[in-house]
Amino acid sequence: MPKKNQVNRREFVSRSLGVAGAAAVVLPRLQAAPPARTNTANGTVSYGFIGAGSRGQQLLQHLSKTDAGRCLAMCDIYPPNIDKGLKTLGQNADKVADYRQVLDRKDIDAVYIAVPLFAHFEITKAALDAGKHVFCEKSLVFTPEEVHGLRAACAAHPKQVLQTGLQRRYSQFYQMARQMIDKGMLGRVTHIHAQWHRNSDWRRPVKDKKLEEQINWRLYRKYSGGLAAELASHQIDIADWMFGSTPVSVVGVGGIDYWKDGRDVYDNIQLIYTYPKGHKLLYSSINNNAHMPFGGLPGVREVGEVIMGDAGSIQISLDRGTGHGMWYREANAPKQTAAGTAKENWTAGATVLDLAVGKGLPLLPSAEIDVTDKDSFLTKEMKFAKKWLYQKGVLVPEEIHDPVYVELEDFLLCVRDGKKPLADLEVGLHDSIGVILSNLAMDEKRTVFYSEMEKMGRGSAPVRAKA
């Protein structure tokens, strides 16, 4: 007879299916008027790529793996970036220095935009006006004027797809976490602790001093939203998604306290966001220590979130292209959960619940560990072994596909099939508003209310920073 907290591998498999199987179902798409379907040759979307710098190169690595789209033009103001980008993509395309030449082409259906933040709005609006579908990296916009301006531009072009580069929305692990919340498995969720810590100066080498701001644009406020835009934006979006609402207010502190090198964006920020029902996001980002204080995710560094409820917690991260997640149940979890009784919601079995209280249980993509009648004997044994190793904390499950790849390909499928993206205009704008108001709260050393955005940036044209 096994002891109370012990279970053999097949017992673990059968009892954990309630966690892995139920939570792994992908969330349905948001319901809204869909964009128009695009007539594409052989189901392939023709696109232009604007901004083949550091982030652009990462995106192109993923785009090289999909047949859903073909690049017809690549644009960058620095010619070596174009050459490198085409090599990365493995395709031939026209080389363009001015993005307007991409937008003028009638044979291009869509564009990917991966330029520095300060230029997002200008190019995105021009692309919409030119009839193109748009994928734009986060943060979607830079200023309050641009929040209002882009909302108006999209309203004028309702049949076009606009997607924001917030890849955690496309992660199986984060989708599982959202469904576990919906099923009441964390009880009443109240807090999220999030961090993105690095131990580096965030600076790129510059051979020609004239190119300092062009290459290190993230370090200068006239181009960049700093740590709030480049890192916190991902986790602000996660909190909005998991809490199911956007914040009421934000307060925080920031400083240039470690890297005294001429930058004018903060090198460390600490923020607290308050939501309508009292939920709170506590956020930290620093540039001189990469330690992850949350235990339980082997091999994870720098970045992650802990989603906390009165019945349990999820520790989760998207690190180096794959999601990681562990579920921990509170020992004195309330019998009544947010979605119903414990009996109705804890579908995994008593032994699994005991394990979750002790060491936690991993979130598992169902396709990786579900045993089916079609599996060979060897495949079944491999899946049993994986589940056993996951339970022991020896092996961490991985994403079936990198969420960046998923979001990039899904954009092409949304364009082709007239679907609404998971990270759409409003998701992107709420995220950008969070970034803008976070910086304002730190700059003015006060509590900033989200309602202030409605009056900010009205009645004037967007202020454009010039390189």
Image: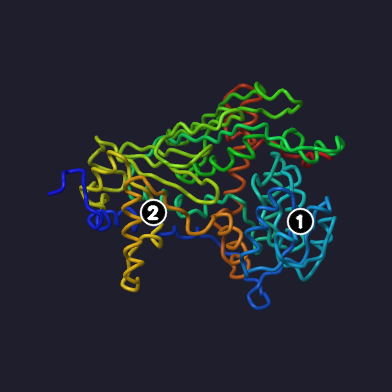
- As displayed, is residue 251 above or below residue 188? above
The amino acid type found where label 2 is placed reads Leu
Marks 1 and 2 sit apart, C-alpha to C-alpha, by 37 Å
Q: In this rendering, would 18 be left or right of 429?
A: left
Which residue is rendered at x = 38% and y = 39% of the image? Answer: 189
Residue at 26% x, 55% y: name it: 9
Question: Which is nearer the N-term, disc 1 or disc 2?
Answer: 1
Residue 18 location in percent, x, y?
A: 29, 55
Instruction: Please tell me in which quadrant of the rendered image residue 159 appears.
Output: bottom right
Residue shown at 73% from the left, 45% from the top: 116
Q: Is residue 161 left or right of residue 422?
A: right
Q: In which quadrant of the rendered view does residue 445 lie? A: top right
- The three-letter code of the residue at mark 1 reads Lys
Q: Nearer the viewer, residue 220 or 359?
A: 359
Where residue 65 appears, as percent x and y from the top left, is 62, 64
- Tag 1 and tag 2, C-beta contact below 8 Å: no
Which element carries disc 2, helix, strand or loop? loop
- The vertical placement of 57 against 377, above or below, is above
| Residue assigned mark 1 | 84
Front-most of residues 345 and 318: 318
Q: Secondary structure at mark 1?
A: helix
Give above or below for 359 relative to 411. above
- Residue placed under numbered mark 2 in the picture: 364
Quadrant location of the C terminus? top right
Give the foreground label among 1 and 2. 1
The structure residue drawn at horizontal position 69% and vertical position 39%, both measured from the top left corner, is: 144
Is residue 180 found left or right of 147 in the rendered image? left
